[in-house]
Amino acid sequence: MFNIITNTIEKELFYKGDLILKYKINYPSIHTSKCKLLNFNIFNFNLAIEQEKYVTNTLFREAVQTYEYNLSNGYPIMVYELIYDYTITYNENNIISLYFDNYIFSGGAHGSTTRTSQNWNMLYGNQFTLDKLFPDNQNYLINILQNINNQIEENIQNGNGQYFDNYCKLVLENFNLQNFYILSDSLFAIYFQQYDIAPYSSGIPVFEINYK
């Protein structure tokens, strides 16, 4: 197990004396001098810097435009917000698996969250793909899709969660090989983004699947 440290970049941005944007970016790192392990640190540091550049450039400009519009039309000041945070789902046997949720509020009834994930083999200092979990199963994609649809059918029958009527078609169209993370030595999770296969109220749909 690796000792993973949380690093934080946090700031409030003002325009004409008013707070219009705040952000908090959490990203992981490992205290190490080994080159292979440093790949993990460098990769996640660069992602955090990219997030901060997006906030201070693109999102700040949008917040300024909204501020000026609201001010000229007598509307209250709205504060934009970005929260970028991660969850470690597996940290054993030289494997680190984690996902990031990127929450952005830029007006409207609610904000939106986008999820990404990373799966690292720390022996080699690189990320691995979903097919590595199924070295002897060439039909693993078909099996995964069938498993997901079976879980959705069961959830609907049990009254757990809501899905769009054409979820079978949407699961196939929105399935992303990158959208997975490890939960245990025999279990992993596949996730879909908000609105991919279900309404906003269902959040980010996650399906746990055995691979051993």
Image (cartoon, helix red, strand yellow):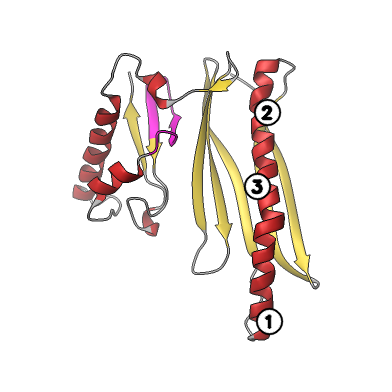
User: Along the line of sight, which residue is nearer the eye, 182 or 72?
Assistant: 72
Quarter of the image with the N terminus in it: top right
Q: Which residue is mark 3?
A: 51
Kindly report the distance in space between the C-alpha atoms of the residues bearing marks 1 and 3. 28 Å
Q: Position of 70 compared to 208: left or right?
A: right
Circle 1 packing at 10 Å, graded few (<14), some (14-19), many (20+), is: few
Q: Considering only order in the chain, which callout, 2 or 3, is on the residue closer to the N terminus?
A: 2
Amino acid bearing label 3 = Gln
How many C-alpha atoms fall within 10 Å of the one at disc 3: few (<14), some, or many (≥20)?
many
Residue type at numbered disc 2:
Asn
State which quadrant residue 11 falls in: bottom right
- Determine if residue 29 is in view: no
Who's the residue at 72% across and 55% down the image? 56
As drawn, is 28 to the left or to the right of 159? right
Would you place residue 58 above or below residue 5 in this image?
A: below
Q: Which residue is mark 1?
A: 71
CA distance separating discs 3 and 2: 15 Å
- Asked if residue 183 is among those painted magenta in the image, a careful observer would answer yes
Residue indicated by mark 2: 41
Dot 1: element: helix
Q: In the rendered structure, which segment of residues is drawn in magenta?
A: 176-189
- In the displayed image of the protein, which residue is found farthest to the left? 157
User: Foreground: 5 or 70?
Assistant: 70
Q: Specify few, some or many for label 2: CA neighbours under 10 Å numbering under 14, 14-19, or 20 or more.
A: some
Instruction: Point out which mark residue 37 bears.
Output: none
Residue 145 lies in quadrant: top left
Residue 30 visible within the image: yes
Q: Locate the C terminus and report the quarter of the image it occupies.
A: top left
CA–CA distance between discs 2 and 1?
A: 42 Å
